[in-house]
Image (cartoon, helix red, strand yellow):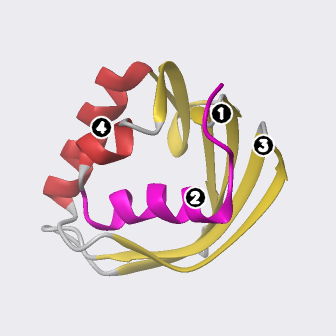
Amino acid sequence: MGRTVTIELLDEIQSGFNSQNVEAILTHFTDDCEWLMARGPNAPEGRRCVGKVEIGEVLSARYQQIPDMRWEEMRHWIVDQSKAISEWVVRGTPIEGEPFEYLGCDLWEFRDGLVTKKDTYWKSIG
């Protein structure tokens, strides 16, 4: 029997993202997890990362490029023990870029309290 999906669990996962602790983040994911990123080359899903190794590499590279990246103004909803939604504002300043601020959300899927899928969306103003 796995962990229960709760608001506290979602806050714990988000804390890992905000502390940029890739190892802590990945303890919440299954080995066969996937992450559909908000942007990427493949229509309609953006970029699909599969497995802890690839997700860890992407997160590590992101945090090197955006050392102050953080998710704030968090709100979570638990749908059931297999699905949840998080809404947030992500902010940061890339090393070689301008500050950004996006309103976004994650659609989470779980198995035994571990993330099997993280599907990320954010508003693009332009």
Q: Are marks 4 and 3 in contact (CB under 8 Å)?
A: no
Are there few (<14), some (14-19), or many (20+) residues within 10 Å of tag 1? Answer: some
Magenta span: helix, strand or loop, mainly?
Answer: helix
Residue density around tag 4, few if under 14, some if 14–19, many if 20 or more, within 10 Å:
few
| Residue at image mark 4 | 58
Q: Amino acid at mark 4?
A: Val
**Residue 114 is drawn in which quadrant?**
top right
Residue that numbered label 2 is attached to: 10
Choose the circle earlier in sequence order: 1 or 3: 1
Q: Which amino acid, mark 1?
A: Glu
Q: Is residue 6 magenta?
A: yes
- Report the side of 24 relative to 114 (left or right): left
Q: Is residue 78 above or below residue 18?
A: above
Question: In the image, is residue 56 part of the stretch drawn in magenta?
Answer: no
Could you say which quadrant of the image residue 6 lies in? bottom right
The mark nearer the N terminus, 2 or 4, is: 2
Q: Secondary structure at mark 1?
A: loop
Circle 1 residue: 45
Q: Which circle's residue, 2 or 1, is located before the other in the chain?
A: 2
Image quadrant holding the N terminus, namely: top right
At a point 22% along the width and 74% down the height, the residue shown is 68
Secondary structure under tag 2 reads helix
Q: Which residue is mark 3?
A: 83
Q: CA distance from mark 1 to mark 3?
A: 19 Å
3D distance between C-alphas at marks 3 and 2: 11 Å
Q: Residues within 10 Å of mark 3 (few under 14, many from 20)?
A: some
Name which of mark 4 and mark 3 comes first in the sequence.
4
- The number of numbered badges drawn on the structure is 4
